[in-house]
């Protein structure tokens, strides 16, 4: 699975360039956004994308949703972080311009991948909502990363990816639910506990390195 995700991200980056363990069920203490990235250095994470991505299984399509917030992706391994960070950077101007149309300066960006598990699988990229802090958010805009995304169909084992732009009210440091075509995700609270633990470890590793 890790090899598949690495290949998927590599393919997405190429396309963008050419086109421009269990955890207890205890509550998650919310982390203020400014604290989530404060003193959180780059290059000390060890997690992989599948450790923090949400999975939504549709009848013929597997959907993965991953927030691109720096407070989240900085806990990833250096290669994984670099790939996602550069993916956003390569589309930054377009993402900013689309967000400005809706008066949003700091949008919540998400990486979505659609993987066909059956031949001629269909998906509806617009049928996505995020429930966060008691509010429901629909994508303001979708930036396709792969050719043919707009066709909304997949061959078996085919992949389509895009960056979704949401309002800045989506708080990735609180429990949330991503729903695709009426099917809700589960597990963000467990993922968030994993992220919080890794943030502490990242800071500890960085401090040990600076003190060496």
Image: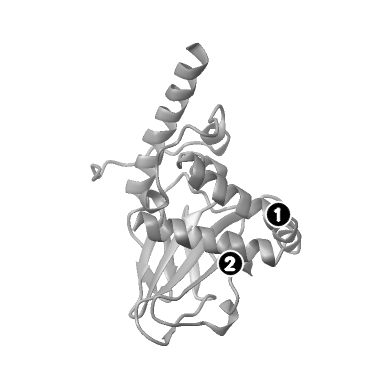
Vertical comparison of 27 with 94: above or below = above
N-terminal label among 1 and 2: 1
Disc 1 and disc 2: Cα gap in Å?
A: 17 Å
Query: Residue 139 lies in what quarter of the image?
Result: bottom right
Q: Nearer the viewer, residue 161 or 179?
A: 161
User: Residue, x 54% and y 58% (percent of image)?
Assistant: 110
Vertical comparison of 65 with 116: above or below = above
Query: Residue 21 lies in what quarter of the image?
Result: top left
Q: Is residue 136 visible?
A: no
The residue that disc 2 covers is 139
Residue 55: image x %, image y %? 37, 62
User: Residue, x 53% and y 63% (percent of image)?
Assistant: 11
Q: Is residue 177 left or right of residue 42?
A: left
Q: Nearer the viewer, residue 134 or 206?
A: 206
Neighbours of disc 1 within 10 Å: few (<14), some (14-19), many (20+): few
Mark identifier at residue 47:
none
The residue that disc 1 covers is 92
């Amino acid at each position: 699975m890790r090899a598949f995700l690495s290949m998927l991200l590599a393919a997405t980056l190429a396309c963008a360039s050419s086109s421009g363990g269990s955890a207890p069920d205890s509550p998650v203490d919310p982390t203020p956004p400014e604290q989530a990235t404060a003193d959180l250095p780059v290059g000390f994470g060890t997690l992989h994308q599948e450790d923090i991505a949400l999975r939504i299984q549709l009848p013929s399509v597997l959907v993965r949703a991953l927030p691109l917030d720096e407070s989240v992706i900085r806990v990833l391994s250096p290669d994984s972080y670099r790939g996602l960070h550069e993916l956003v950077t390569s589309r930054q101007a377009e993402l900013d311009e689309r967000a400005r149309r809706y008066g949003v300066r700091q949008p919540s960006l998400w990486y979505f991948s659609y993987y066909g598990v059956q031949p001629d699988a269909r998906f509806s990229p617009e049928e996505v909502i995020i429930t966060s802090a008691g509010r429901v958010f629909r994508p303001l805009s979708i930036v396709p990363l792969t050719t043919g995304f707009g066709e909304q169909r997949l061959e078996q084992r085919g992949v389509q990816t895009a960056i979704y732009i949401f309002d800045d009210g989506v708080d990735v440091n609180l429990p949330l639910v991503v729903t695709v075509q009426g099917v809700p995700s589960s597990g963000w609270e467990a993922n968030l506990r994993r992220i919080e633990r890794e943030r502490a470890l990242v800071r500890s590793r960085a401090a040990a390195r600076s003190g060496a």
